[in-house]
Amino acid sequence: MSRDARWKALLELLVERGRLDVEDAAAELGVSAATIRRDFDGLAEQQMLVRTRGGAVVHGVSYELPLRYKTARHASEKQRIAKAVADLVAPGEAVGLTGGTTTTEVARALAVRGDLASGSPALTVVTNALNIAGELVVRPQFKIVLTGGVARAQSYELVGPLADGVLGQITVDVAVLGVVAFDVTHGAAAHDEAEAAINRLLCERAERVVVAADSSKLGQRAFAWICAAEAVDTLVTDTAADVETVQRFEEAGLRVLTA
């Protein structure tokens, strides 16, 4: 296992458990305790974790794993969700994409759609996510609109009043939200309040709103509120979603698609 792969695995384990011991981590990853100690030291130098005697802990209970360290958790589910979301977008439409792993997969699914291979433009994509813009800008048939703003290292998203200025001057046919949590009562939410504010504005500028969220995000709450469940037209999730949870969203007026 490469160092990069170990670091990703260690960070995900930390996010899930809050604390890791050297010996337990070594056994889980199948490497020596000395290797894990070096990994913990390296991650601590990058302020990705806090070293403790015999192990490591995350910085806090609301710790947000940076996008560049996220592995393919629920990868197959996200890819299925992404294709289902992409199928909801019609040629020639303007689509807004927030940042995140699932919306990045949506961008990739749009990029390989045969009916979007040509056009002037085939699609207009508005995003505040640097990585999504970077992936799609090589598609000459897509018109890419990137908001201004200050970049967040955790998510590659641009936030702040400069982003507000651009979004305040445009409208989109559909906004696709990647969320940390989505609950019928508490709505859609993110870790960061600045990201949530941009996502909320994008929703307001959209004709229809789609939440793309794997089943692990449903029924959860997070710090920064984006919008109420009633502001969302369609929820696209995976087939592992709890039946009662899906029913509650449908009763709230949402169309729910499982992929």
Image (tube, grey):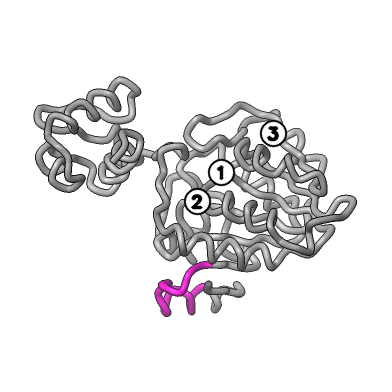
Q: Are marks 3 and 2 in contact (CB under 8 Å)?
A: no
* Residue at point 70%, 28% (across, down): 162
* Whole-percent x, y for residue 16 in the image: 28, 49
Left or right: residue 210 compared with residue 29: right
Task: Classify mark 1: helix, strand or loop.
Answer: helix
* Relative image position of residue 82 (x, y in whole percent): 58, 61
Residue type at the position of mark 2 = Ala
Residue occupied by mark 3: 163
Task: Please provide the residue range marked out in magenta.
Answer: 237-249
Q: Distance between the residues labelled 2 and 1?
A: 7 Å
Label disc, if present, on residue 189 of the rendered structure: 2
* Residue depicted at 65% across the width and 42% down the height: 135
Furthest-top residue in this view: 45
Is the C-beta separation of discs 2 and 1 under 8 Å?
A: yes
Residue sticking out furthest to the front: 1
The residue shown at (20%, 45%) is 29
**Which mark sits nearer the N-terminus, 1 or 3?**
3
Q: Earlier in the sequence, mark 2 or mark 1?
A: 2
Q: Looking at the picture, how far across and down is residue 203, in whole percent? A: 68, 52
Judging depth in this view, the residue of 34 and 15 nearest the camera is: 34
Q: What residue type is labelled 1?
A: Ala
Find residue 114 and report its image quarter.
Answer: bottom right
